[in-house]
Image (tube, helix red, strand yellow):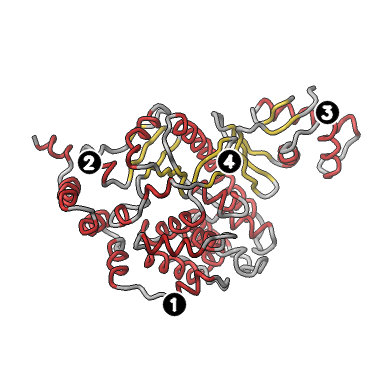
Amino acid sequence: MTSQSARRLAAFGLRNGLEELQPAFSSAEWAALLHEVVSHRLSGLLLEAIDRGSQPVLDGQRDQAEALHFDVMSRAVQLDGVLAGAANRLRAAGIEYRALKGSAHAHLLYPDPTLRPYVDVDLLVPGSQFADAVSALETLSFVRAARELRPGYDRRFGKGATLRRSDAAIDLHRTFVAGPYAFLVDYDAMFDRATAFVVGGVDVQTLCAEERLIHAAFHCVLSDAVPSLIAHRDVAQAVLTPDLDVDRVLGLASRWRATGVLVSAVRRAWSVLDLREEHRLVDWAATTPTGPGDRYLLWAYGGVRRRWARQSIAAVPVVPGWRAKVEYARAISRPSHADRAAG
Amino acid sequence: MSEYYRQRDNCVWRRIGTAGVVVAVNGGEPVRLRGRAALLWRLLAAPMSDDDATRSMCESGLIDVGPADARREVVRLLQMLMLLGVVEAH
């Protein structure tokens, strides 16, 4: 459960501009707030609110907020270095990629990247080039954290893999999420167009504004049992992106059976952050009913325990083709390295 | 000293209030820049001579000494930033 103070902070700058957020916090309240600031990645918004005079503070509290944000941003700039290196390596290997979340959100959704902390690097690559991408990143000393469940699983069924190095981890994605939406979304279409942003002198490719909004919605609604406040803020920022093609967003959501996800994300973002901003997508989300199909898909990503199992089982009906359904079910229920261990 | 200085392309910077943190992407540890160093780094987003940098730093009020001492301070900061690999001279 997030506090009202943290939710107001997460909305800072979106509602009434330079409003005063709340009175200065006592030491105990401040300690509790800092805990939420860390877990919900709000250190940039906190420092900005203080420096703009919207959040009064007691002696020493600004210094604490600045020290915290220094640590968070020191990590962010290191991760940008990792992203730039990975982008260069993938491009040299002829592998398409799109940076997801983190640095891409910070640079393209927010007025200043300092407002959006992140803790890892996420890259989407085509399924057909997934193995090549792993190999390319291994030349940068990254090591895959877990084995492929069965030969060909990554390319056909998997969400992706985590690659680790001593200084960072890269989440290499084939899809935005596991479960049904690993099959319902046309991920190849993500590589038909791109937006670029510059990190350390390197042009980094990422999703266009409409795909970015849908991905932010997926992350907010489907990825975590308890989504962070910054995930809600990402959705709000993505909705409020100037020149967003709303018709294209709605078309993509419909084509990928993600209307329920988008409705849920926009409603949640506006509700949790208590936003008043008017927008066509907000009106649409408020008036669009979610049907049984939407609710089933959202159910697949609910719950706190055994989420992977629930998502995997819920995906079986949408895996295309009977043979593929059998192969998918076999892979998730009995990985080949389990066969080897049993043999 | 050389004629012009500028931020190196291969650096990543984040503003933190009036300070900031910078790192060269091909290695090295993030460095925290405050006060004069942070301002000079931001000024060098565009190529600038040490004389122009000294003038801008004095106008900002962050350096409040005579012209010769101000220039010495700016040159010292420029050398520090170049040593860190985040500024280059042309």
How many neighbours does mark 3 have within 10 angstroms: few (below 14), some (14-19), or many (20 or more)?
few
Residue A204 horizontal/vertical position (percent): 52, 40
Q: Is residue A181 above or below residue B28?
A: below
Lower position in the chain sequence, tag 1 or tag 2: 2
Residue that numbered label 1 is attached to? A287
Lower position in the chain sequence, tag 4 or tag 1: 4
Residue at image location 64% in from the left, 60% down from the top: A49
State whether discs 2 and 4 lie on one chain: yes
Residue A265 horizontal/vertical position (percent): 43, 65
Quadrant the N terminus of chain B occupies:
top right
| Dot in front, 3 or 4 | 4
Lower position in the chain sequence, tag 2 or tag 4: 2
Subunit of mark 2?
A
Residue A149's tag is 2
For marks 4 and 1, give the CA distance.
39 Å
Q: Amino acid at mark 2?
A: Leu
Q: Mark 2 touching mark 4, by CB under 8 A? A: no
For marks 1 and 2, give the CA distance.
42 Å
Residue that numbered label 4 is attached to? A198
Residue at image location 42% in from the left, 49% down from the top: A190
Q: Amino acid at mark 4?
A: Val
Question: As drawn, which residue projects farthest toward the right?
Answer: B66
Between B41 and A43, the residue placed more toward the observer is: B41
Question: As drawn, which residue projects farthest toward the left?
Answer: A343
Residue that numbered label 3 is attached to? B72
Residue A322's tag is none
Between B14 and A29, the residue placed more toward the observer is: B14
For marks 2 and 4, give the CA distance.
35 Å
